[in-house]
Amino acid sequence: MGEKIAASYLRDIGWTNIQRNVLVGGYELDIVGRDPDGLLVVVEVKFSEHGLPGFTGEVRLNHRKIAALRRGLEMFVAKHHRDTVAGCRLDAICVTPKKGELTNNTNDYIINHYINVLG
């Protein structure tokens, strides 16, 4: 559910070529796409059904996960986009329902988009 909402949100803000659940070298990249400037971006999506303290997506996005995502991003670029001159980026999106109900409407969710989590 979280990846579907995140992909819809990204389309709404002008992203293109969005792919979900991309497998590369043993890693699953939740979303791969191009931001409005054309930059290749891999997005890790964390979904928290209830948003309870200690269970938010932000808490679950730790250093180990970011390191694995970096390796997955590097493998994806090496395999599919060796000619990427503009570079690439790793983002994270945390999705939480506003009222605890699961819908298909992005307006029913709190969406926190963290740009360039690698710093």
Image: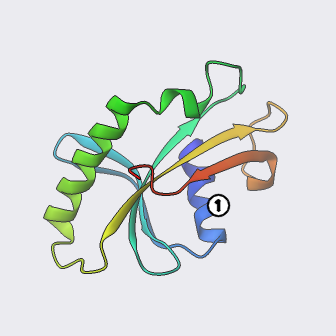
Q: Residue 50: horizontal and vertical position, in percent?
A: 72, 25
Q: 35 left or right of 72?
A: right
Looking at the image, which residue sits at the far front? 119
Q: Is residue 33 above or below residue 97?
A: below
- Place of residue 64 in the rendered image (x, y in percent of width and height, measured from the top left): 32, 30
Q: Say above or below: 98 vs 8.
A: above
Pointer 1 local density, CA inside 10 Å: few below 14, some 14–19, many at least 20: some
Q: How many marks?
A: 1
When asked about the image quadrant of residue 2, the answer is top right
Q: Quadrant of the N terminus?
A: top right
What residue does disc 1 label? 9
Image side of residue 112 versus residue 30, left or right: right
User: Mark 1 belongs to which amino acid?
Assistant: Tyr
Which secondary structure, mark 1? helix
Residue 76 image offset from top left, x and y in percent: 22, 58
Residue 11 vs residue 38: left or right?
right
